[in-house]
Image (cartoon, grey):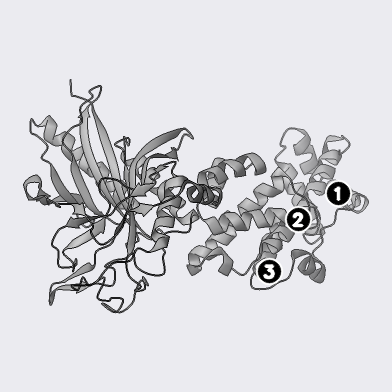
Amino acid sequence: MPTAYEPVIGLEIHAQLKTASKAFCACPTTFGAKPNVNTCPICLGHPGTLPVLNANLVTFAVRMGLATHCSIRPVSTFARKNYFYADLPKGYQISQYEDPICYQGFVEIEQEDETTKRIGITRIHMEEDSGKSIHDLDIDTLVDLNRAGVPLIEIVSEPDIRSAREAYLYLQQLRQILIYLDICDGNMEEGSLRCDANVSVRPVGTEPFGTKTEVKNLNSFRNVEKAIEYEIARQIEVLEAGGSVVQQTMMWDAGTQSTKVMRSKEMAHDYRYFPEPDLPPVEVSEAWVGELGKSLPELGLDKKRRFRSQYGLPAYDAGILVDDVELAHYYEQAVKGLKNPSNDTFKQVSNWMMTEILRIMGERKIGVSEVGLSPLQLASLVDVVADGTISNKTAKEIFPDLVGTERLAGEIVEERGLVQVSDVGALRAIVSEIVSANPDNVQKYREGKTKLLGFFVGQVLKATGGSANPNVATDLMREALDGQPAE
């Protein structure tokens, strides 16, 4: 009988912080600048230069630690991590080693079946980024040092992740927290969020971990999931063939959809950490940490739970809305503007956002603030449908005329004479005429072909040029056909 295996996964995530200047000098951190212009003697590692700690690096690291339930170390230190790459001009990276500023936290992930799981966080430490090597086959390797010295936090998880999907959800949750805190833009394509995965497998029911491999070059959520799935399958195949997994650093090749060896354990770096002599210990007071804790915003998972309880939204709707902090804020502004607040109108606001507004955002590659429809305008559209002024079909027709203007739905409805007829007396007379004119269909309806109700209501709408309130027309037609008074 084949052995069943269980994956054991831990993620190391580097997040570039949204500080205006670098970690230890005043150079700007602007992405996309011409190569090697955002540099100075300090971040280039010239002899005799001294680093000065960016206070916002500490603030952002502590905020992330508090948001992930970490303990905050009152005194932490920097160290030099020594290695020699072309894009590391100093020959070392300033990082933290033995005493990271944040430790022993956790993140809660919500899985597809709505169960939750805690993924432990071993540490969050501060460091600086390296430069960037650009490999050009025609010219050889080029080096851009604009990124050298940009502030990072590295978030190291416990080996608590048991599937590629859990890894995806954990990374997604961390990214959402970073964006809600406004300390990282979370852009994996631009390298502001980078992920390495440590993957091993072991027979189900055993305690010792298997030999792990580290997978690098994961620059999208989908690649993280695919690479981990591939590496799990590869390791199981090796073990079932009687072989042994070798501790190696792998890279994900998106072209071949496979992992490839970068270096073996024997080639792994000895970083020769030692204390950074030019930076004093980082001291944070309990009072200051407490103040930072009070200033934390409501985070995505808490907001999702509140949206479900406060507005009665399904999990799917709430998840989509809170994934974008601006979209979540827009939703709350729209529901505050409703004249007829109820779970039904709360859901209608969500429906419009998840169809029309997200469609515009996707087509134009813009944020919700650039759509050209204010939350109050959307609320006005939901209101005129909810109070029976117009049908949902008419609302869809006038939606494009609201975008790019400051007009409310009621103004357009009144201007165009689109108010639907809800007068019971007038509609009852039309219903009576239609019933009288269709005796054969009336007989078929009464013999059990109740789907003909749609035909009769359609005739009412046709007779009124589409202005009849379909709900009122349906009730009156059912009354006439069934011989029962409409409610």
**Which amino acid is tagged 2?**
Asp
Q: Position of residue 414 (x, y in %)?
A: 82, 67
Q: Is residue 117 above or below residue 224?
A: above
> Circles 3 and 2: CB distance less than 8 Å?
no
Total numbered labels: 3
Q: Earlier in the sequence, mark 3 or mark 2?
A: 2
Which type of secondary structure does the marked residue at label 2 adopt? helix
Looking at the rendered image, the disc whose residue lies closer to the viewer, 1 or 3, is 3
**Which residue is identified by label 3?**
402
**Placement of the C terminus among the 4 image quadrants:** top right
Drawn side of residue 467 relative to residue 155, left or right = right
Q: CA distance from mark 2 to mark 1?
A: 28 Å
Q: Is residue 431 above or below residue 118?
A: below
**Which amino acid is tagged 1?**
Val
Can residue 391 be seen here? no
Using the rendered view, name the quadrant where residue 415 is placed.
bottom right
**Which amino acid is tagged 3?**
Leu
**Which residue is identified by label 1?**
431
